[in-house]
Image (cartoon, rainbow, N blue to C red):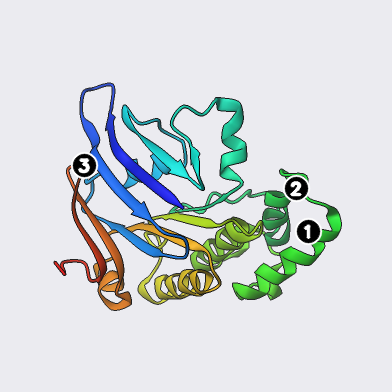
Amino acid sequence: MLRIENVTKVYPNGSEGVKNANIHIEKGEFVFFIGSSGSGKSTLIKLLMKELNPTKGRIIINGINTTDMKQSQIPYLRRNLGIVFQDFRLLPNKTVYENVAFAMQVIEAPTRLIRRNVPTVLSLVGLSHKARAYPNQLSGGEQQRTALARAIVNNPPILIADEPTGNLDPDTAWEIMNLLEEINKRGTTVVVATHAKDMVDIMQKRVVALNHGVVVRDVKKGGYDDEA
């Protein structure tokens, strides 16, 4: 499903964002990337999203080696990735419905499919009643749920979330994490970069810990500091 093989990323200033990382994620897994600020987890997420290219090593997603992928091929790769960010990145001039539908329009999905899928995912994230609202009329949690709906409306096999609860209060953050778990239960592979220790401890999923770009721990089921 997703393989990171001997990957190193060196930035122009000479700093290493990731050092010789090896991670294999199977279909249907829920994986936390954890570590303090500067640990390398965001670099790893950007490498998976093809926002960055590795200096060494290779990244394989759904059997495709993305390392030497041409720029023109990247949009097709991202059709297989649902992506959620800390800052939501919603289109301010579009309603909740339109923000979610836009993700289908850019891949030229049929109108009938858009009309079927968008209400379905809005119901899943609990936003059916907000379909006509604009982002500035939503709470932070509602904006993040809209972003989640947009990320999954095309049924991607992999969902990548970079600090998805970073701007949310604790109760709302748990709502988002519970949604991610529900999406995972429906068959989507979920990768979450986070520093939310309490959530990682309680959810007891696979944990990949990074420190100064190095994978220092890979625990199949555990908490933020668990060694086994």
- 3D distance between C-alphas at marks 1 and 2: 8 Å
Which residue corresponds to the image point at 24% horizontal and 67% vertical from the top-left? 197
Which residue corresponds to the image point at 61% horizontal and 27% vertical from the top-left? 72
Q: Quadrant of the C terminus?
A: bottom left
Mark 3 and 1 residues: CB-CB less than 8 Å, in contact?
Answer: no
Indicate which disc, 2 or 3, sits on the residue closer to the N terminus.
Answer: 2
Quarter where residue 164 is shown = bottom left
Q: Which residue is mark 1?
A: 114
Which residue corresponds to the image point at 26% horizontal and 42% vertical from the top-left? 21
Does residue 105 appear to the left or right of 227 in the view shown? right
- 3D distance between C-alphas at marks 3 and 1: 40 Å
Mark 1 and 2 residues: CB-CB less than 8 Å, in contact?
Answer: yes
Q: Which residue is mark 3?
A: 213
- 3D distance between C-alphas at marks 2 and 3: 37 Å
- Residue 130 visible? The answer is no
Q: 29 or 226: which is nearer to us?
A: 29
The amino acid sitting under disc 3 is Gly
The amino acid sitting under disc 1 is Ile
Indicate which disc, 3 or 1, sits on the residue closer to the N terminus.
Answer: 1
